[in-house]
Each structure stands twice: as C-alpha cells, then as structure tokens.
Amino acid sequence: MTERRRHPAVRAGDEGARHQILTRYNGTNDSAEEYGDRAVKLYDIFERYNAPLRG
C-alpha cells in the first residue's frame, strides 16, 4: 500500500490565514474580498464534518 502524503493545511484556528488565502487566490478587488468571506464560511462547514475523520 502506498503511503499517503499529508499536504500542508490551514488549521481550524487560522481563520485570518484562510480568509487571506481564499481572497487572494480569487483576486485583489472587492468581489474577491466578498468571495473570501463566503468561502471561509463554507470551509468551516466542511471542516466541522471532516476534522473527526482526520483524527
């Protein structure tokens, strides 16, 4: 069986870093900032369900 590599991840407590990454990935204008706000909320939903699976 091949070994699974863990990629660096933004941890649950790094909300500011998550927002900054998601916003910057989508641009530098106001719409990118708004998208970053929405994306962080969605990320938090997925994180709530996936965190227990990672242990």
Image (tube, grey):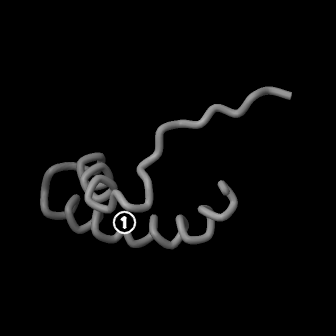
Q: In this view, does 41 lie above or below 27?
A: below
Q: What's the residue at 79%, 26% (across, down)? A: 2
Residue 4: x and y, percent? 70, 33
**Residue 9 image offset from top left, x and y in percent:** 46, 45
Q: Nearer the viewer, residue 32 or 55?
A: 55
The residue located at (39%, 72%) in the rendering is: 41
Residue drawn at x 75%, y 28% is 3
**Rendering quarter of residue 54:** bottom right
Q: Which of 24 and 9 is in front in this view?
A: 9
Q: Is residue 40 left or right of residue 42?
A: left
Q: Nearer the viewer, residue 39 or 55?
A: 55
Q: Which residue in the protein does label 1 denote?
A: 40
Q: Where is residue 48 in the image (x, y as percent from the top left)?
A: 55, 71
Q: What residue type is labelled 1?
A: Val
- Quarter residue 14 falls in: bottom left
In percent of width and height, residue 47 lies at 53, 65
| Image mark count | 1
Indicate the quadrant where residue 5 lies.
top right
Secondary structure of the residue carrying numbered label 1:
helix
* Quadrant where the image shows the C terminus: bottom right
- Residue at the far right: name it: 1
Mark 1: give few (<14), some (14-19) or many (20+) Cα within 10 Å: many
Report the quarter where the N terminus lies.
top right
Give left or right: position of 46 versus 53. Answer: left
Q: Which residue lies furthest to the top in this view?
A: 2
